Image (tube, rainbow, N blue to C red):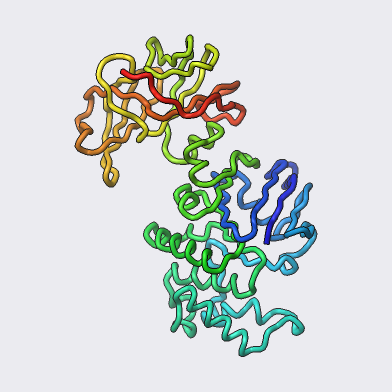
């Protein structure tokens, strides 16, 4: 089922939670709504579900205007963060619930309801647990039951609100892989809300990055990570560094020196340089960024070094293989970004002003 959100505005009192949001979700697609708290992602999900009504705008399911329809009329499957299972019902009864409460003319026979529920329990790898109660299950098992219950009604759209937020890190990672496999097998149009960027990038076909009630960028995980369109997206997705720099005759200067990076088509003036900790190379000599290592820590197969470039700039973080990284504080390190992006515009772009505009793609260094 295709879902189209057109020019949606949602106000709570006088507070605009969403402002002129439009989004097309393709049939069978797995879409992540990603953003910090207060970005509007859960409000958008609830509007799609019919749990809230838009102040302005329209929501289409296929070619049909669903804006005034109830949750039941939209045939939504909803999975909440805290499972929302009925504690007094067995696993089988929980999964069967949505079918059992249908009007008589739309309710399958009892044997068909049982068969469908058992099939779904097998799909979510809970066969043999149908007689247990929620209190007898782990958190991960409860969330599988919640997903089976949502799928039992054969929903037009499956919506998940922070589905793994209440689980520990290892269980979340296992369930992410499992959910992707379930989606590929069932083909439901699925929208899920998360503030976990790793979760969104790993699971979704496309990621919708939201901030302050608006959509910043929509794209594949690769597009979002490799080609962020704004300082906010660059800073929110993955780790990043930003430095206040100056452009002069096509060269990028940091404080009082060029750093070996060129932006030939850019006019002179101030800008903000963004780069990721792993997109750097160590260099010798001048024409680079250099500073003192103030801290270091091991992160899996790499070592992260915090480097102070001077009093007027915040420290940056670089990532190196352990064998190339010095763990001694106050050692000097010289480096240059290998992939980077400039943003220019009014306002405090170093803090991710959404008014700033990208002024170029990732560019190569000029050399040592």
The relative height of residue 130 versus residue 182 in the rendered view (above or below) is: below
Q: Is residue 265 visible?
A: yes
Which residue is depicted at the point 52% across and 64% down?
Answer: 184
Image coords of residue 368 (percent x, y): 31, 18
Image coords of residue 283 (percent x, y): 27, 22
Which residue is depicted at the point 50% across and 46% down?
Answer: 221
Which residue is depicted at the point 52% across and 68% down?
Answer: 185
Please count the marks in the image: 0
The quadrant of the image that shows the N terminus is bottom right
Res 177 → quadrant: bottom left
The relative height of residue 15 versus residue 33 in the rendered view (above or below) is: above
Image coords of residue 83 (percent x, y): 53, 67
303 horizontally vs 207: left or right = left
Which residue is depicted at the point 53% across and 64% down?
Answer: 183
The relative height of residue 211 versus residue 365 in the rendered view (above or below) is: below
Using the image as rendered, state which of residue 29 and residue 59 is in the foreground: 29
Q: Is residue 16 visible?
A: no
The relative height of residue 188 versus residue 45 in the rendered view (above or below) is: below
Image coords of residue 73 (percent x, y): 75, 68
């Amino acid at each position: 089922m295709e879902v189209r959100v057109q020019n949606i505005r949602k106000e709570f009192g006088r507070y605009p939670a969403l402002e002129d949001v439009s989004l097309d979700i393709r049939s069978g697609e797995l879409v992540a709504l990603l953003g910090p708290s207060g970005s509007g992602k859960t409000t958008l999900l609830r509007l799609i579900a019919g749990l809230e009504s838009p102040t302005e705008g329209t929501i289409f399911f296929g070619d049909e205007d669903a804006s005034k329809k109830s949750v039941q009329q939209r045939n939504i499957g909803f999975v909440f963060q805290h499972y929302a299972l009925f504690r007094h019902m067995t696993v089988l009864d929980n999964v069967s619930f949505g079918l059992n409460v249908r009007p008589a003319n739309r309710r399958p026979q009892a044997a068909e309801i049982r068969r469908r529920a058992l099939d779904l329990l097998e799909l979510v790898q809970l066969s043999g647990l149908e007689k247990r109660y929620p209190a007898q299950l782990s958190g991960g098992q409860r969330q599988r039951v919640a997903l089976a219950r949502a799928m039992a009604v054969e929903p037009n759209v499956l919506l998940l609100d922070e589905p793994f937020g209440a689980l520990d890190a290892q269980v979340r990672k296992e369930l992410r892989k499992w959910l992707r496999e379930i989606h590929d097998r069932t083909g439901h149009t699925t929208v899920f809300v998360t503030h976990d960027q790793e979760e969104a990038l790993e699971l979704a076909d496309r990621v919708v990055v939201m901030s302050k009630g608006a959509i910043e960028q929509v794209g594949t995980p690769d597009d979002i990570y490799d080609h962020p369109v704004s300082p906010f997206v660059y800073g929110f997705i993955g780790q990043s560094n930003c430095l206040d720099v100056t452009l002069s005759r096509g060269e990028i200067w940091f404080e009082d020196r060029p750093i070996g990076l060129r932006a030939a088509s850019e006019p002179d003036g101030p800008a903000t340089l963004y780069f990721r900790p792993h997109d750097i190379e160590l260099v010798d000599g001048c024409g680079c960024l250099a500073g003192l290592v103030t801290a270091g820590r091991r992160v899996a197969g790499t070592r992260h070094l915090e480097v102070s470039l001077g009093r007027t700039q915040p420290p940056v973080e670089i990532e190196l293989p352990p064998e190339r990284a010095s763990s001694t504080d106050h050692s000097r390190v010289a480096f240059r970004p290998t992939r980077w992006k400039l943003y220019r515009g009014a306002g405090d772009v170093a803090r991710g002003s959404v008014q700033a505009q990208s002024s170029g793609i990732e560019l190569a260094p000029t050399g040592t």
